[in-house]
Image: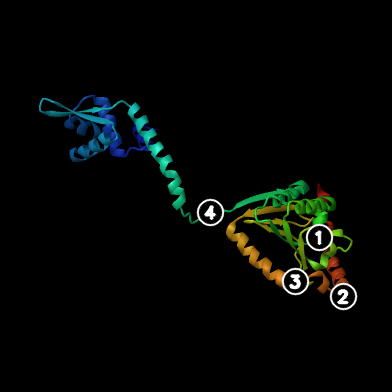
Amino acid sequence: MSLEQDLKLIGLEEKEAKVYLAALELGPTNIQNLTKKSGIKRSTVYEMIKNLQAMGLISETIKGKRKIYVASEPENLKRNIKAKEQLFNEILPELKSISNIGFVKPKITFYENREGLRNIYRDTLKIKNKLVLWVSTTQNIADTIGEKFLEEYIEERAKKKIWSKALHITFKKIFEYKYLNPETYEKTLREVRFAPSEIDLPNTIAIYDDKVAVISSRKEGFGFVVESKDYAKTMKVFYNLLWNISKPWHEMDFDSQDKNMENKEINNSDDDLDYWAKV
């Protein structure tokens, strides 16, 4: 890279760089020599000299009846850059206050294996708005992150005064799980509803703050968190639609669904070929 290109990178325009380098090489000189050395027409050289004088990079003196131009020491360039940096630092807060960036990339974090998926649950304990929206199949959660960890998570969430609205996918519900008992809801800060039996969602979804987490079934063993205000807002709309067509425990007739649940379990028997069996 040439000196001329280097000077352009630190803030000089192309013609300013040519005139300044010509003045440096020539020493005290007149306009004719600067014009010839820089290869720029005379009228433009005058204009560039004014710019360089404003930056403190060229000075003017009189010798006889002629104007002589002298390039300032290169150290002046450094002082000029520092002055610009200081000015930028001063106006940066104001620039940030008025900025309106049209395109913001969402942050996406990928997780895998049991401990990685547990970290998604731990992340929900750091929320600001103290409410997590869940769509889940309890059996899948217990199989994926472990029933003991799930119980510890629920208790820790309650200690932190974080509420949960939990939508359970009905056909996979397990009856022996202690926190499905309605008597535990208030103590563990939960509102619980059960989705219509025809809805089959194998993945777990959590919506909290501006984040949406998706946790796969045990068969696939992965998860990811999308941090996006717009995406979280969209998912909350879908969540509320599902919540509104779901029922609380006392309105459910689980006995009448037993046969339907058994049939679905048979149709989903490939779940036995799961991720954890491979690791």
Identified at 25% across, 29% down, the residue is 23
User: Which residue is under mark 2?
Assistant: 256
User: Which residue is under mark 3?
Assistant: 246
Using the image as rendered, state which of residue 224 and residue 61 is in the foreground. 61
Quick one: label 2, few (<14), some, or many (20+) residues within 10 Å? few
**Alpha carbon distance from label 3 to label 4:** 35 Å
* Mark identifier at residue 138: 1
**Alpha carbon distance from label 4 to label 2:** 49 Å
Do the numbered discs 3 and 2 sit on residues whose CB atoms are within 8 Å?
A: no
Q: Looking at the image, tell me whether mark 3 or mark 2 is earlier in sequence order.
A: 3
Q: Looking at the image, tell me whether mark 3 or mark 1 is earlier in sequence order.
A: 1
- Amino acid type at circle 4 is Val
**Alpha carbon distance from label 4 to label 1:** 35 Å
Colour scheme shown: rainbow
**Alpha carbon distance from label 3 to label 1:** 16 Å
Helix or strand or loop: what does disc 1 sit on?
A: helix
Placement of 26 over or under 19, stated as above or below: above
Q: Residue furthest left?
A: 65
Using the image as rendered, state which of residue 99 and residue 138 is in the foreground. 99
- Amino acid type at circle 1 is Thr
- Amino acid type at circle 3 is Ser
User: Which residue is under mark 4?
Assistant: 104
- Where in the figure is residue 5, as x and y percent of width and height? 36, 35
- Amino acid type at circle 2 is Ser
- Where in the figure is residue 54, as x and y percent of width and height? 27, 36
Helix or strand or loop: what does disc 4 sit on?
A: loop
